[in-house]
Amino acid sequence: MNPQSDVSNSPSSEPSRSINRSGTLDQQRLKSLAEVDNAPFSRFHVKVCCVAGVGFFTDAYDIFAISIASTMLGYVYGNSEQLDDLQNLGVKIATPIGTLIGQLLFGWLADVLGRKKMYGFELMIIIVGTLTQAVAGSAHAVGIIGVLVMWRFIMGIGIGGDYPLSAIITSEFASTRTRGRLMTAVFAFQGWGQLGASIVSLIVTAAYKSSIVNSLPFEVPIDFMWRIVIGLGCVPACIALYFRLTIPETPRFTMDIERNIANATRDIEIMYTTNAGLYNADERENHAVVERIEAPRATRRDFWAHFSKWKNGKVLLGCAWSWFVLDVAFYGLNLNTSTILQNIGFNVGGSSTAVNSNGDRIHDAQAVYNSLFSTAVGNVILSVAGLIPGYWVSFLFIDSWGRKPIQLMGFSVLTVLFLIMGFAFDKFNGHGNDAPAAKAFVFLYCLTNFFQNFGPNTTTFIIPGEVFPTRYRSTAHGISAASGKLGAVLAQLISFAAKNSTKTVLEVYAFFMLTGIASTLLLPETRGKSLEELSNEDQEKFMHVKSHSS
């Protein structure tokens, strides 16, 4: 008998075979992921961008439509033609609170159950929440503002789910060379959503002009108007729903979390070499051989062990704080655009009440229309002049300049702009649409929107989708995004506490932008690096075969 054959067949040879096979698995995994990282731009990438982007269009439309809708609600249901401070706070703060919860919940679920299994459910929540707002009413036991607050909170949970899911799916499908531009293109749909809400508000206001001016009471047509503006937000969500439910699972989740290299390799071959638009990942389940593979698992102990290391924890801290301070200003401005424009006299339409010869108060319907129309026009101008160009300038430079330089530049410029707008606010205040001072303020406001988007508003979305390991990528992105929505909630509380003192609020925003510079320094530059390089984990000994004795 050959002694060598005895050795090779002995139990002691099992560990060595497992070690050799583990090395092969690591090589196969890295080779497959390299195909994703080096894949040429294709129709599949366009599909991923559009499917994810339409969701962000819907998110932004639904969030920021309340800026003008709250003014309409004030004319219909408010005292003295406006919502009181608590009502206004409620309708504006409900969605960010819901979004915060949705980001944490869906971020965690996407790492546990899979990106594909969760993608689409968040849109269902958005559709239901939006439609129910549009048909909401009041009764003896509950007022309509309370009903709207509840449904905007529920809608916010769905919107929150979209952030980590869309970011991670786009990041994990993208090639290294184009990942920044692809993620920026997805996020740029947010600008189109804000513009869409403004244009719809403008069209609806113009369409109801005769009804507002000639009907008594004018509250009736305005009641139709805000319902149309909000209700139309579910249309793009309905269009995108089917495509989200049929998008394939990302190869990185299949490989690193499901620990099925064979399925992931086959997915990559099909998605990047065939007509991926017709590919259904569920069809491959019975074709792959399942192997007993071990890889790092997402557990509470492992989570704390990973992020308790400063090299990993500082990245999560930098992502979370940067997004937090950015959203204090971003949502503070964009949820209160109507109020800020009114405070500088840009959209003055005159008071909608007057006193007749008998001393009785009467309504001036024309002034109501002028106010609503001017507010809608102002929102369109701010979107076109600042928001949308900022996204697309980011798109041009994100993969050449890098994420970190753009974020540092953005926070620095925003600090200066908010200081100017805040400390010089009294010089801009109350001069009317045609006054140079009002125009100067609108110009600075547009610059602020521009450098938010050609700056931290874009990069705080991208970086958390790149810098964490696959098993925590969605969870950590959700934590970062939820920190941002905590900032959005704080922004509304600051406005409430300051009693709409725009000067004070702008000065506070300058301080927050300054701290964003410091948090950005904690972040790595992600341009040109694979997701595995950025995970801060050893990729050579990532997987191993479970021995038969275990």
Image: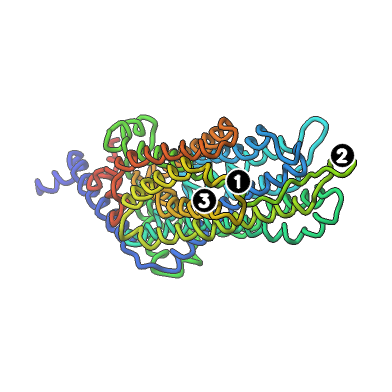
Rendering coords of residue 370 (x, y %): 72, 54
**Residue 81, disc:** none
Q: State left or right for residue 28 relative to residue 65.
A: left
Q: Nearer the viewer, mark 3 or mark 2?
A: 2
Choose mark 3 or mark 1, whichever is in front: 1
Please tell me in which quadrant of the rendered image residue 206 appears: bottom right
- Using the numbered discs, state the Cα–Cα distance from disc 3 to disc 2 in whole angstroms: 38 Å
Of residues 515 and 523, the one nearer the viewer is: 515
Q: Position of residue 371 (x, y in %)?
A: 70, 51
User: Image point 46% across, 70% down: which residue?
Assistant: 275
Residue 359: mark: 2
Tell me the element at label 2.
loop
**Residue visible at 27% across and 58% down in the picture:** 31
- Identify the mark nearer the N-term, 3 or 1: 1
First in residue order: circle 3 vs circle 2: 2
Rendered location of residue 77, percent (x, y):
77, 40
Determine whether, in the image, residue 80 is placed left or right of residue 512: right
Q: Earlier in the sequence, mark 1 or mark 2?
A: 2
Q: CA distance from mark 1 to mark 2?
A: 28 Å
Please, what is the three-letter code of the amino acid marked with disc 3? Phe
Regarding residue 278, the answer to whether it shows in the image is yes
Residue that label 3 marks: 441
Cα gap from disc 3 to disc 1, whole angstroms: 11 Å
Q: Dot 1 lies on which element?
A: loop
Horizontally, residue 537 falls left or right of residue 133, namely: left
Q: Position of residue 501 (x, y in %)?
A: 56, 36
Badge 2: few (under 14), some or many (20 or more) residues near its Cα, within 10 Å? few
Residue position for label 1: 430
Query: For the point 42% across and 69% down, which residue is it?
Result: 274
Is 331 situated above or below 234? above
Q: Is residue 63 visible?
A: no
Q: Name the quadrant containing residue 439.
A: bottom right
